[in-house]
Amino acid sequence: MSKLLVFATEMERDGVFPNGIPQGYDCLISGVGILPTALNLGKAFQSGNYKYAIQIGIAGAYRSSDLELTEVVEVESDCLIEFLPWEPNTFFASENSPFKENLKRVKGATVLCCSNTEEMGIARGEIAQVETMEGAAFFAVCKEYGVQATQIRAISNYAVGQAKSEWKIAEALGSLEELFN
């Protein structure tokens, strides 16, 4: 196989591909967060011969981004935002993305936990438009193994000030399903 689809959760995989993964692709459920993504993606690349990988899932948007709930974007770069004050070399980018859809390209911030104050959301929103929990690890591992990487996210929520009960997870996954099917 030369193409890998990566999802943090089975819920995301099943929401985007309810009838199963398209023929010609392998699928990895990496787990939520930086560490599971790095470990499981590294294992997949060691045992497989992949030319490119596409990470698909949901993300939160910073209010300053002007992104709409359920909008689908391509994350062109991602950073480990909590490490930025101490370690400036935490930016990872898509290189030669094979994805050819005409999507808005945004910057991501990989977080250990969601922004929980307006001040934090404003500060992070000056660096990125969306927050993810796996994006920087995905890009870093792909770069390490020489795999072309694309990260596609649908906005399920705003990063600050929105109760989880108000998130539009099903609708965001529906937007991704529409894009890929």
Image: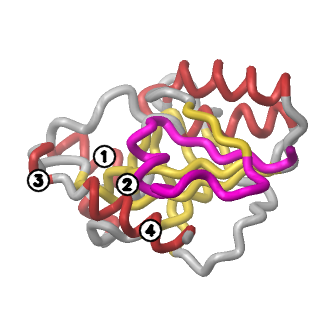
SS at badge 1: helix
SS at badge 3: helix
Q: Which of the two marks, 4 or 2, is nearer to us in this view? A: 4
Name the mark on residue 72: 4
> In this picture, which residue range is highlighted in magenta?
1-25
Whether tag 1 and tag 2 are in contact, CB under 8 A, the answer is: yes
Left or right: where does residue 43 sit relative to residue 163? right
Name the mark on residue 123: 1
Q: For the residue marked with disc 2, what is the amino acid?
A: Glu
Distance of label 1 from label 4 (alpha carbons): 23 Å
For image coordinates 84% across by 24% down, the residue present is: 47
Look at the image and tell me in which quarter the N terminus lies: top right
Q: Which of the two marks, 1 or 4, is nearer to us in this view? A: 4
Q: Position of residue 95 (x, y in %)?
A: 78, 55
Q: For the residue marked with disc 1, what is the amino acid?
A: Ala
Name the mark on residue 126: 2
Q: Pick the residue in front: 89 or 53.
A: 53
